[in-house]
Amino acid sequence: MMLLEGRLMTLVYRLGLARTIFDARQLIRHGHVSVDGQRVDVPSFSVSPGQIIGLTPGSTELDRVKSALETRASVSSPTPYLEVQSDGVSGKFLGIQSVTDIPVTRINVQKIVEFYSK
C-alpha cells in the first residue's frame, strides 16, 4: 500500500489537484505536472520523501484543475503525509510513516496482499 500511495498519480489526486485518479493520470500524461520543477509525464513515477509535486506554469488555468482546486478548498488537509505549499498548487511529499496514515475507503487491503503474494 505504501508503494501505491507513493506513486505520482496517487499523490496528485490526494493533493486535490485532480478530481479523480483518472483525471490525475491524464494531467500527468499531458505534461501538466512537475516534480521538483521538472516536468514528469509518467503516472507511476515513484516520488521520494521531500520532493515537491506541482503544476507546470499555465496548467492552473485549465477548467478541470480550477474545479479540483475549488473542491479541495473545502477539505482541511489532504493526508498526513502531504503538505500543501503556500502557493496552493503544489505540495511536499513527507513520506508515509505508517500504513494507518493511508486513507482507505473502498479498498480491501487483505485482497491486495493476497493478490500480490502469489
Image (cartoon, helix red, strand yellow):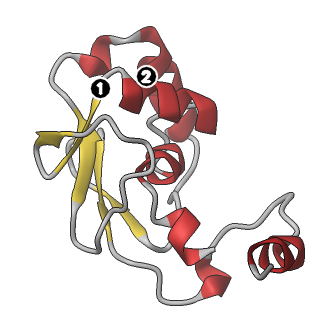
Mark 1 or mark 2: whose residue is earlier in sequence: 1
Q: Residue at x 46, y 53 (%)?
A: 11
- Residue 54 seen in render: yes
Mark number, residue 65: 2
* SS type, badge 2: helix
Q: Residue 114 at what x, y percent from top left?
A: 85, 79
| In the image, residue 60 above or below residue 76 | above
Amino acid type at mark 2: Val
Res 55 quadrant in image? top left
Q: Residue 45 at what x, y percent from top left?
A: 36, 53
Mark number, residue 32: 1
Pointer 1 with pointer 2, Cβ within 8 A: yes
| In the image, residue 59 above or below residue 63 | below
Amino acid type at mark 1: His
Q: On the picture, is 17 further left or further right than 36?
A: right
Between 29 and 82, the one lying in front of the other is: 29
Between 86 and 53, the one lying in front of the other is: 53
Q: On the picture, is 97 further left or further right than 38?
A: right
| In the image, residue 116 above or below residue 23 | below
Figure quadrant of the C terminus: bottom right
Figure quadrant of the N terminus: bottom right
Res 63 quadrant in image? top left
Numbered marks: total: 2
Q: On the picture, is 6 further left or further right than 57?
A: right
